[in-house]
Image: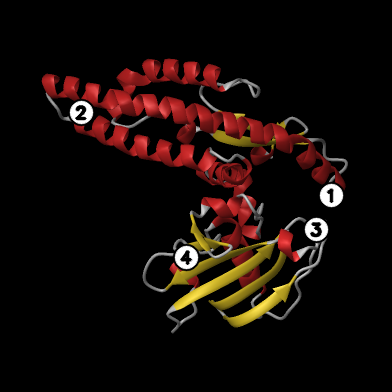
Amino acid sequence: MIHQIQLHNIRSWTHGTVALGSGPQLLWGVNGAGKTTLLEACIIAATGRSHRASALREVVARGADAARLTVTVGDEEVADPLAQSTLAVEIPAHGRTQTLLNGTPRRPAALMERIKVAVFVPEETGLVVGAPAVRRALIDRVATQWHPGYEQALTRYERALKQRNRLLKDALEADGATRRALALEMRPWTEMLIATGAEIIEGRLALLMALDAPLAEAHREVAPSEGTIAMRYTSRENYDPSAPREKIATMLTQAFADTAETEGYQGHTLVGPHRDDATFLVGGNNLAAT
């Protein structure tokens, strides 16, 4: 848990220190007091990203050269300062953000091993009725913190997808010989999509199964008569929620084979986790349709 957070030149906060106790915390203040910025700082400390800004430099206070936030974290039950860690994120107005763990530069992924955070704001109602990309982004955001290798698999998948789509697009107007050469060049990218895609899908399925009970319990507390809520993974391949990675990879391999001809006409990749979705069900009914 977070024990203390210090902010310097982050939006409206020129400087400040906030100590947090155990259990639920209530932030109260007038409009513009900086409540949301404090929450945003916690999210940046946990994920290396902001839920409000597309680029971290946007959080740097106007006229400042850089912003910095420092967070002290540790187990809720352990009060010993020696058992705590200090996370710092230094954000220049121009340049590269630096992440430090106990004073040592680390990759942003190291933050996610220390703090687990989930964000829900009024705008997130789009989770139910919005585009599939909104739901995929939420699942990926949580899975990245929940599964140690998920972010790396997602990065490799996105890179392979970009390269494969480029080759498919190039093949649209190519002659026969060039098409064959592009198909050979595409093969390793397809293999990478299958390997990393299977890991991503396995992680998403496991996450949704893990969320089943707490999601249903939370829903019962606020709407006990509305039926049980569940979040189900939806895809062209209709994966079994408990399917192992090897089975998912086999199904993806077949899906790529089945769509190869259509992909050749359309010029982009038609199967994989970037095409999947999740559906909210209440009492067995699709919440988006009610």
Describe the element under mark 3 as helix, strand or loop: loop
Say what secondary structure mark 4 lies in: helix
Q: Residue shown at 58%/41% (left/top)?
A: 148
Gap in Å between the C-alphas at discs 1 and 4?
35 Å
In depth, the one of 68 and 77 nearer the eye is: 77
Q: Secondary structure at mark 1?
A: helix
Question: Mark 2 belongs to which amino acid?
Answer: Ala
Quarter in which the N terminus is drawn: bottom right
Whole-angstrom CA distance, mark 3 to mark 4, is: 32 Å
Query: Which residue in the protein does label 4 denote?
Result: 56
Q: Which residue is mark 2?
A: 171
User: Mark 4 or mark 1, which is nearer the start of the sequence?
Assistant: 4
Going by the numbered disc 4, the residue's amino acid type is Leu
Give the label, 3 or 4, closer to the camera.
Answer: 3
Q: Mark 1 = which residue?
A: 222
What quarter of the picture does the C terminus occupy? top right
| Residue 271 seen by the camera | no
Q: Residue at x 64, y 52 (%)?
A: 125
Callout 1, which amino acid? Val
Contact? badges 2 and 3 (CB < 8 Å): no
Would residue 215 be seen by someone viewing this image from the given angle? yes
Q: Name the N-terminal-most of marks 2 and 4.
A: 4
